[in-house]
Image (cartoon, rainbow, N blue to C red):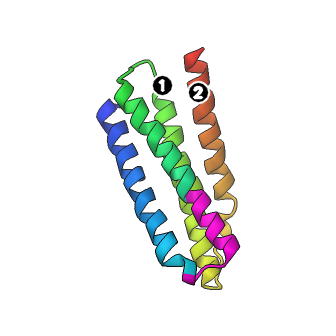
Amino acid sequence: MTPQISIATGALFGMLAVIFGAFGAHFLKKTLNTNQLQSFETGVKYQMYHAIVLLVIGLSNNAMIPTTVYWCFTLGIILFSFSIYGLVFSDSKGKKLKFLGPITPVGGLLLVVGWGLLLVYAI
């Protein structure tokens, strides 16, 4: 994984987090209940936090950071945040996609593993 890929991935996820956050704040407030909106916001927050981490990893230009950290954060964002988005939207339409439920914790686990690998790297 090159620094440019990490920066581009972080920038893409960051941009999408801003778009999704604005969409949630301005349009979804009218269609989602409080719990759904909070879940959606959690997905956006975690996406943005980890987008920033991907940017920092890329900007550090440190070849010693394992590629697995990049993949844990990238796949973690996709599985965690995007499964939350799918669950919220499907629930708001009355057709909850229950198969997404078990995917969310897998994404969360990948995010935790990414942080753990960074900790090991730092030590």
Q: Tell me the amino acid under the disc marked 1.
A: Pro
Kindly report the distance in space between the C-alpha atoms of the residues bearing marks 2 and 1. 8 Å
Which segment is the magenta one? 30-43
Mark carried by residue 117? 2
Kindly give the residue lying farthest to the top in the view shown. Answer: 123
Image quadrant in which the C terminus is located: top right
Q: Tell me the amino acid under the disc marked 2.
A: Leu
| Residue 76: % across, % down | 56, 47
The residue singled out by tag 1 in the image is 66
Viewer-side residue, 22 vs 75: 22
| Residue 119: % across, % down | 61, 23
**Residue drawn at the location 51% of the way across and 70% of the way down:** 24
Query: Counting other residues with Cα less than 10 Å from the Cα at mark 1, is it few (<14), some (14-19), or many (20 or more)?
Result: some
| Residue 78: % across, % down | 51, 54
Image quadrant in which the N terminus is located: top left
| Residue 51: % across, % down | 45, 45
Kindly give the residue lying farthest to the left in the view shown. Answer: 4
**Left or right for 93, reference 12:** right
- Asked if 120 appears above or below 14 in the picture, the reply is above
**Residue drawn at the location 51% of the way across and 43% of the way down:** 50
Chief secondary structure of the magenta portion = helix
As for residue 79 lying within the magenta part, the answer is: no
**Left or right for 113, reference 72:** right
Q: Earlier in the sequence, mark 2 or mark 1?
A: 1
- Asked if 82 appears above or below 73 in the picture, the reply is below
**Left or right for 80, reference 71:** right
Q: Quadrant of residue 58?
A: top left
- Asked if 115 appears above or below 95 in the picture, the reply is above
Q: Secondary structure at mark 1?
A: loop
**Residue drawn at the location 55% of the way across and 19% of the way down:** 121
Instruction: Verify CB contact (< 8 Å) between mark 2 and mark 1.
Output: yes
